[in-house]
Image (cartoon, coloured by chain):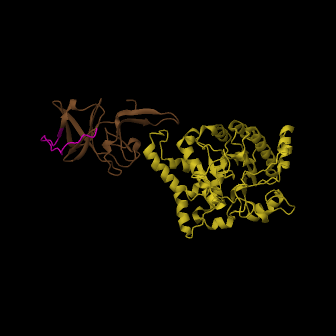
Chain colours: A brown, B yellow
């Protein structure tokens, strides 16, 4: 989850970083890479890969070292309903939650958001783009 | 002329004898008479009151009896002199039951107290309105008592004393359900039992040594109550429930709300039914009274707090007559920002109790 490597330089003309083979990524385990653009967390989910900058907008914590998974969605009192599976990173400091897919704060509870990066798969390699932007947020029923 | 709506006034009975005609069963009349009965929740054995009593000795009626026990004298000394337009009567003696252990006895006593004050006070002057006392020992019986008064226009609220169960707990829900059904706000007030009896609300950290310490710490009960109600989702279950916290002060409200909002951000996963900042529930469902007014040297600091807590909507005037620590209306009005004066003095309470007025 907190694997680190030496700062990687881009390998592609597009500026993308090769962070490993697809099969090197366990599902739902966030791996952290020190890239020239900064520390980035990458996770493989059943819906694809997500990458976010490893920095919480609240106090700058290494957010990607927090717990990844889902969270309890809005419910009636005393009813706990789990949702947003494979999409929520919970910051190890203060517990703020963000969608890995979009970088948005869960339910917009904090002003800030995580910086996201596009992930492409080419020839079985996982490429993290310098370009910012992520995938659509999974539904709560996922 | 500023109209006044006093949300905390205490009519008093002179003893259990006053209530006996309102107790139907002979067995209970005998029992209350036989006991060395004290109509006070205060642990006088534990705490010495520096003034000897919590009641104003200058408010003793000319014919004798406890201060606040004579409607005619109260009319002169309180309603007329202070120029009160509406007064909410909280029969504080009924709250003694929060230190009791027998739910049936508590219900009989509370019911008799309600009937006594309705008969002898509410009918005496139309300015006097009742908050009926309900026992915290048997919420189902209390709900029945609330519904019994549903159609009585003199009853505009419910005075609920607490046991050592936080207000968000489902234990109290029968009372909340009846309160909403009848359109009655619930008023909570220190009973004197806090920190004195097993079963009564505790004060945190330990047992205070004296009255000064204990009284300073009373707001702890309000902090705990609000926090519990908000996070347990009481105001989502009972959207129209209104809680008036009397005599707990108010200058602590803004930091409590900040703290709740911050903890919610961290622990939303535990209380996912809270889908807006907790402070919003406080603004919508909880109200605070002015007495005892904090007295910072720089009054503008207090005004800042009033603004931070939306005092123009959440703060209600209260005097606490005939207790020793009364706040006179003029004293309070002078210490309110001009733009907030009429709201706090009357309009906010008129809105809170609107369904019953």
In the image: residue A27, left or right of residue B25 = left
Residue drawn at point x = 25 percent, y = 43 percent: A40
- Place residue B23 in its image quadrant: top right
Residue A35, image x, y percentages: 20, 45
Residue at the far bottom in the pictured view: B297
| Most common secondary structure along the magenta stretch | loop
Residue A12 inside the magenta-drawn segment: yes
Nearest to the observer: residue B336 or residue B47: B47
Q: In the picture, residue A50 is in which quadrant?
A: top left
Q: Which residue is drawn at 21% across and 29% down?
A: A23
**Residue B91 seen in render:** no
Which of the pair B67/B147 is nearer the observer? B67
Residue sitting farthest toward the left: A13
Tell me if B130 is positioned left or right of A79 in this view.
right
What is the magenta range?
A1-18
Q: Is residue B77 above or below residue B276?
A: below
Residue B3: image location, x then y, percent: 68, 61
Where does residue B338 sit, x and y in percent of width and height?
A: 59, 66
Q: Where is residue A57 in the image (x, y as percent from the top left)?
A: 33, 49
Quadrant showing the N terminus of chain B: bottom right
Give the left or right position of residue B180, taking residue B116 as reference. left
Q: Residue at x 46, y 46 (%)?
A: B264
- Say whether residue B53 is magenta: no
Q: Can residue A56 be seen in this view?
A: yes
Q: Tag count in the figure? A: 0
Say above or below: B314 vs B236: below
């Amino acid at each position: 989850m907190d694997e680190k490597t030496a700062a990687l330089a881009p390998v592609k003309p597009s500026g993308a970083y090769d962070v490993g083979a697809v099969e090197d990524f366990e599902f739902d385990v966030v791996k952290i890479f020190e890239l020239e653009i900064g520390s980035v967390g990458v996770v493989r989910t059943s819906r694809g890969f997500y990458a976010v900058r490893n920095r919480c907008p609240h106090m700058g914590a290494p957010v990607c070292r927090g717990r990844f998974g889902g969270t309890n969605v809005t419910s009636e009192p005393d009813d706990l309903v789990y949702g947003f599976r494979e999409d929520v990173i919970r910051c190890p400091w203060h517990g703020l939650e963000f969608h890995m897919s979009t970088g948005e704060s869960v339910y917009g509870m904090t002003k800030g958001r995580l910086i996201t990066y596009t992930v492409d798969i080419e020839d079985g390699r996982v490429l993290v783009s310098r370009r910012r932007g992520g995938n659509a947020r999974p539904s709560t029923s996922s | 002329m500023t109209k006044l709506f006093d949300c905390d006034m205490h009519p008093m009975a002179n003893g259990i004898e006053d209530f006996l005609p309102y107790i139907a069963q002979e067995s209970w009349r005998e029992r209350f008479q036989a006991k060395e009965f004290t109509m006070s929740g205060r642990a006088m054995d534990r705490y010495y009151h520096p003034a000897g009593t919590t009641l104003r000795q200058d408010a003793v009626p000319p014919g004798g009896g406890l201060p606040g026990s004579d409607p005619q004298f109260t009319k002169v000394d309180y309603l007329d002199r202070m120029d009160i337009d509406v007064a909410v009567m909280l029969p504080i003696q009924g709250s003694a039951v929060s230190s009791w252990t027998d739910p049936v006895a508590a219900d009989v006593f509370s019911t008799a107290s309600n009937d006594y004050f309705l008969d002898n006070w509410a009918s005496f002057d139309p300015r006097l309105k009742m908050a009926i006392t309900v026992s915290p020992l048997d919420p189902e019986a209390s709900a029945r008592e609330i519904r019994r008064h549903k159609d009585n226009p003199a009853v505009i609220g419910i005075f609920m004393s607490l046991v050592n169960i936080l207000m968000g707990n489902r234990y109290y829900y029968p009372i909340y359900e009846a309160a909403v059904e009848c359109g009655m706000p619930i008023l909570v007030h220190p009973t004197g039992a806090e920190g004195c009896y097993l079963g009564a609300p505790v004060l945190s950290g330990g047992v205070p040594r004296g009255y000064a310490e204990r009284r300073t710490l009373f707001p702890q009960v309000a902090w705990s109550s609000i926090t519990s109600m908000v996070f347990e989702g009481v105001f989502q279950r009972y959207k129209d429930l209104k809680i008036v916290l009397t005599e707990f002060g108010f200058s602590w409200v803004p930091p409590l709300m900040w703290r709740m909002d911050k903890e919610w951000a961290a622990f939303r996963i535990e209380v996912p039914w809270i889908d807006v900042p907790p402070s919003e529930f406080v603004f919508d469902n909880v109200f605070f009274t002015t007495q005892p007014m904090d007295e910072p040297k720089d009054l503008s600091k207090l005004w800042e707090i009033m603004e931070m807590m939306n005092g123009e909507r959440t703060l209600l005037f209260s005097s606490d007559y005939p207790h020793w620590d009364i706040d006179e209306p003029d004293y309070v009005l002078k210490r309110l920002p001009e733009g907030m004066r009429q709201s706090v003095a009357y309009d906010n309470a008129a809105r809170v109790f609107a369904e019953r007025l």
